[in-house]
Image (cartoon, rainbow, N blue to C red):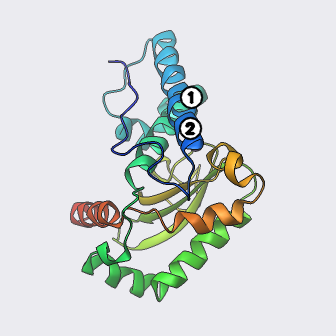
């Protein structure tokens, strides 16, 4: 099975002015595509088959570093596109998620502060994640390069399942924001698909037993 580029559910200019059309187009058709091509090529070269990307990431030590980087890149970007929306409203945060945000962070504003601070302090390329852990608790963690909280504690400080993520590689914002990561991170809060984030939260807390 070859991995293919998933279509976006919105146009490249849908997230303007927060993320510009050119960045979205290049990010999707060049950067994301490159991870998929590299992943397919490497799987063929190593004569390996991945049945599920999720299972691959959860057992990442069975794979080479090239597969880890590119499977991570494919998963992370596919995830990222899903949790963005031009029709973003915090009113879409489910009751359960709102209640857990208050429980683990104090308020939605405090969650944003903690997440944004980690995004600003992260050195180099990577991602910031809001996750659910095995005890259904929400937490924020960062990952380097295309690593991911599913990959285990060798790669992130705490393991969990992402329900929200932000790409902080420069390719995600440089055309519009140049070196100003802070404005990009602030803009992010205007384009979150809270309905999808709430659905992911609901799914994963049900899976925890
Ligand atoms: Mn990216």
Q: Quadrant of the C terminus?
A: bottom left
User: Callout 1 environment at 10 Å: few (<14), some (14 to 19), or many (20+)?
Assistant: few
Which sits in the foreground, 200 or 144? Answer: 200
22 left or right, relative to 191: right
Q: Which residue is mark 2?
A: 27
Q: Which residue is mark 1?
A: 30
User: Callout 2 environment at 10 Å: few (<14), some (14 to 19), or many (20+)?
Assistant: some
SS class, disc 1:
helix
Q: Give the percent coordinates (x, y) of residue 205.
A: 27, 67
Q: Give the percent coordinates (x, y) of residue 9.
A: 33, 44
SS class, disc 2:
helix
- Find residue 188 and report its image quarter: bottom right
> Which residue lies most toward the right here?
179
Which sits in the foreground, 122 or 5? Answer: 5
- Find residue 193 and report its image quarter: bottom left
Mark 2 residue's CB less than 8 Å from ligand 1: yes
**Residue 24 visible, this angle:** yes
Identified at 35% across, 39% down, the residue is 55
Identified at 32% across, 33% down, the residue is 52
Identified at 62% across, 64% down, the residue is 185
| Marks 2,1: beta carbons within 8 A | yes
Q: In the image, is residue 99 above or below residue 63? A: below
Q: What is the distance, in whole Å, between disc 2 and disc 1 at their CAs?
A: 6 Å
């Amino acid at each position: 099975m070859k991995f293919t580029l998933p279509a976006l559910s919105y146009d490249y200019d849908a997230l303007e002015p927060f993320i510009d059309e050119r960045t979205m187009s290049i990010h999707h058709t060049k950067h994301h595509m490159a991870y998929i091509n590299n992943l397919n090529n490497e799987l063929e070269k190593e004569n390996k088959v991945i049945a599920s990307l999720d299972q691959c990431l959860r057992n990442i030590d069975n794979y080479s570093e090239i597969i880890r980087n590119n499977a991570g890149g494919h998963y992370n970007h596919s995830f990222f596109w899903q949790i963005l929306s031009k029709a973003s409203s915090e009113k879409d945060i489910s009751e359960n998620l709102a209640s857990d945000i208050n429980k683990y962070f104090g308020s939605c504003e405090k969650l944003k502060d903690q997440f944004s601070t980690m995004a600003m302090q992260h050195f180099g390329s990577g991602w910031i994640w809001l996750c659910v852990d095995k005890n259904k608790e929400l937490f924020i963690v960062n990952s380097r390069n295309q690593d991911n909280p599913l990959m285990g504690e060798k790669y992130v400080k705490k393991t969990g399942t992402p329900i929200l993520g932000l790409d902080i590689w420069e390719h995600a914002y440089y055309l519009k924001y140049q070196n100003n990561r802070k404005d990009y991170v602030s803009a992010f809060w205007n384009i979150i698909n809270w309905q999808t984030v709430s659905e992911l939260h609901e799914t994963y807390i049900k899976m925890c037993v």
